[in-house]
Image: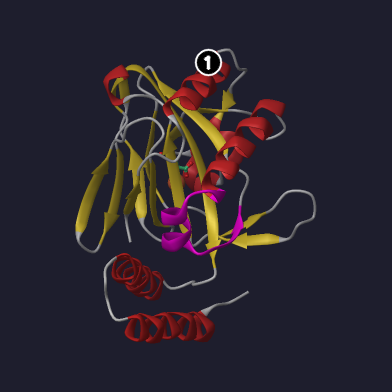
Amino acid sequence: MLLHIPDVIEREQVVQMRAALDGALWTDGRETVGAQGARVKRNQQLPDTSPLRRQLGQTVLSALAKHPLYHAATLPLRTLPPRFNRYEGGGHYGFHVDGAVMALPVDAGQLRSDISCTLFLSEPDDYDGGELIVSDTYGEHEVKLPAGDLIVYPSSSLHRVQPVTRGARLAAFFWVQSLIRDDSRRRLLFELDTSIQTLTRSSADAAAVLQLTGVYHNLLRRWAET
Ligand SMILES: O=C(O)CCC(=O)C(=O)O
Ligand SMILES: [Fe+2]
C-alpha cells in the first residue's frame, strides 16, 4: 500500500529543520548501502553518528508518535532511527530494493524492513526533479510531496529517485517493521479501521460498531507478530 500521510511535521518546524540541515556536514550516501545500491546511489546523507541526525530524528519520531493515521496505516513494531538525505546537482538514486534486514543501533537487535518511508522536507517549488518513483504490480507511481508530508510504501517494491536538476531536495527516510508483515493484510486492517472510525463519528448503531471493532482486534490478534 502506497499511502500519502499529510502534515506529519508542522510547517514552522520544517523550516527550522531545513535551517539546521543547511548548515550541516554531509557525507556520501553510499556509506550506508550495499554493493547493489552503491552502483546507483548519488546523494548525500548526515553521518549516522551525527548529533544533528539524532536530534532531528527524535523530532520526526515524536511527530509520528502523535499521528493516528500513521499508526493505523503502519502498525509499527520497530522503527529504524530516521536518516536524512540531500540530492542536488543531478543527484539521484537509481532503481533498487531496500535491504530486508537491518541492524538497530546499540545492540537493539534487528529490524525486518516491511515499510519504507520518505518524509519530504523541501517544498516542491524549490527544486526540479527529485520525484520518488515506486514500482508495483499496478505500474509506476510518482511521488513529490509538500514539505512535512510523508509517503509510506512496501519495502518490497523497486523504487528510485529522479535526478534533481535545480535546487536541493532534503528528506528524512526510515524503515518500519510492522506488527503485520504482509502488505495486503495490513491494508485490510487499515481499511477496516478507517471505516470503524467513520462509523464511530456518525450515528451508526453502537452495538454493530462494537462488533466490527471486535473483528478488527481479533484479526490483529491472529496476524500480529511481536
Ligand atoms: O530519498 C528518498 O526518497 C528515498 C531514499 C531511498 O530509497 C533509500 O535511501 O533507500
Ligand atoms: Fe530505498
Q: Is residue 74 magenta?
A: yes
Measured as percent of width and height from the top left, residue 172 is found at 50, 36
Q: Residue at x 46, y 23 (%)?
A: 12
**Is the residue 73 above or below the residue 106 in the image?**
below
Measured as percent of width and height from the top left, residue 209 is found at 35, 80
The residue identified by callout 1 is 19
Image quadrant in which the N terminus is located? bottom left
Q: Which region shows up in magenta?
A: 65-79
* Disc 1 secondary structure class: helix
Determine if residue 40 is in view: no
Q: Residue furthest top?
A: 23
Amino acid at dot 1: Ala
Q: Residue at x 34, y 24 (%)?
A: 123
Q: Nearer the viewer, residue 110 or 223?
A: 223
Taking the image as shown, residue 166 lies to the left or right of residue 69, namely left
Measured as percent of width and height from the top left, residue 65 is found at 56, 50
Measured as percent of width and height from the top left, residue 78 is found at 62, 59
Question: Dividing the image into four equal quarters, which quarter contains ligand 1?
Answer: top left
Q: Nearer the viewer, residue 55 or 35?
A: 55
Q: Nearer the viewer, residue 65 or 57?
A: 65
Q: Residue furthest left?
A: 139
Taking the image as shown, residue 97 lies to the left or right of residue 21, namely left
Q: Residue furthest right?
A: 107
Q: Nearer the viewer, residue 215 or 190?
A: 215
